[in-house]
Image (cartoon, rainbow, N blue to C red):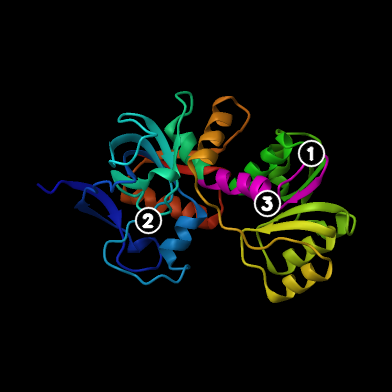
């Protein structure tokens, strides 16, 4: 017998009006998948870009977006042995989260400690993994090295700052709005937070003095990042680098390129354990019930960048 579930879907790409409430077939996990009953979902920039059609994929009927899944395991595929029915989990499948249930490959699901709320897990999952992997996997930041992290008050930047701190960075630079500098200094007062509305970071930081950079903007900003990097330094970018930036990078023998986060059980579980032990912090702007109106509101807030922290919808 076919079982239905409530979801919010879209048939085309565009503004928030493309969303509509519907009922779709409740998914059944494949052999290597976990079926999760949703508890909370965060609004991420990735989600607004997917809704608008920024990734170049063709539209199809009843597309269900939403990057983050947090909730309780409802069913397991026959090959899944690392999770249990009823266990609290978190995942970043990049789609399928705007529904009562979601299926996710088990290798992308993280264990969620009892101390961490579903809302906090949803808020940290995507940006947290991206920031963590940028610093640890892509840059392999070592103790005693310096780092520049752009957008330190954003989800990716804030996680990257915290990761750089525990990795033992000798000097940490970041860029931020003036209203976010105190927020960043709550992590560590020694972080050099540059107000980008008043100063160009490339004029503040000594040329060719930084070991590593987390780039999130590209273009002229990325050229500035190359300028402050040492010869032989390392860069990771969450946006593709232009040919001009690549040429400047290669001229200084700098390594690194565009990097796409890979959601894994190991990284997600480590992040959530650090959140549980208060080694990591995450900002939540607002928690609202999951419905069409609030989903549209959440996307609008993300696009306007009008709040610090995540808007989270609770099922």
User: Which quadrant of the figure has residue 88?
Assistant: top left
Across and down, in percent, residue 51 comes to: 41, 62
Residue designated by label 3: 151
The answer to the question of whether label 2 and label 1 lie on touching residues, with beta carbons closer than 8 A, is no
**Residue segment shown in magenta:** 126-150
Compared with 294, 216 (above or below) is below
How far apart are the two marked residues, 2 and 1, measured between alpha carbons? 39 Å
Q: Earlier in the sequence, mark 1 or mark 3?
A: 1
Q: Earlier in the sequence, mark 2 or mark 1?
A: 2
How far apart are the two marked residues, 2 and 3, measured between alpha carbons? 25 Å
Q: Which mark is residue 143?
A: 1
Residue 315 in sight from this viewpoint: no
Q: Earlier in the sequence, mark 2 or mark 3?
A: 2
Q: Is residue 136 magenta?
A: yes
Assess disc 3: are there few (<14), some (14-19) or many (≥20) residues with their C-alpha within 10 Å of its C-alpha. Answer: many
Across and down, in percent, residue 225 comes to: 78, 60
SS for dot 3 = loop
């Amino acid at each position: 017998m076919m079982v239905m579930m409530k979801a919010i879907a879209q048939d085309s790409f565009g503004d928030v009006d493309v969303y509509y409430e519907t009922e779709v077939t409740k998914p059944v996990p494949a052999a290597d998948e976990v079926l999760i009953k949703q508890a909370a979902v965060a609004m991420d920039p990735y989600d607004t870009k997917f809704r608008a059609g920024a990734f170049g994929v063709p539209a199809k009927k009843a597309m269900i977006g939403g990057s983050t899944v947090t909730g309780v395991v409802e069913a397991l595929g026959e090959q899944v042995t690392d999770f249990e029915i009823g266990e609290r989990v978190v995942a970043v499948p990049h789609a399928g989260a705007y529904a009562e249930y979601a299926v996710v490959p088990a290798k992308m699901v993280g264990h969620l400690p009892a101390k961490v709320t579903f809302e906090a897990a949803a808020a940290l999952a995507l940006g947290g993994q991206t920031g963590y992997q940028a610093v640890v996997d892509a840059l392999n930041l070592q103790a005693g090295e310096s780092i520049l992290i752009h957008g330190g008050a954003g989800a990716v930047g804030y996680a990257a700052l915290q990761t750089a701190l525990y990795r033992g960075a000798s000097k940490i630079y970041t860029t931020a709005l003036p209203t976010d500098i105190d927020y960043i200094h709550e992590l560590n007062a020694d972080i050099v937070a540059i107000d980008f509305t008043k100063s160009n970071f490339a004029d503040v930081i000594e040329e060719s003095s930084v070991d590593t950079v987390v780039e999130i903007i590209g273009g002229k900003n990325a050229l500035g990042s190359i300028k402050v990097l040492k010869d032989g330094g390392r860069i990771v970018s969450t946006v593709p680098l232009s040919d001009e930036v690549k040429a400047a990078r290669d001229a200084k023998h700098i390594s690194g390129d565009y990097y796409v986060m890979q959601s894994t059980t190991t990284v997600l579980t480590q992040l959530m354990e650090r959140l549980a032990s208060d080694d990591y912090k995450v900002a939540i702007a607002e928690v609202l019930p999951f419905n069409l109106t609030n989903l549209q509101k959440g996307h609008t807030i993300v696009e306007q960048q009008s709040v610090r922290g995540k808007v989270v919808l609770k099922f």
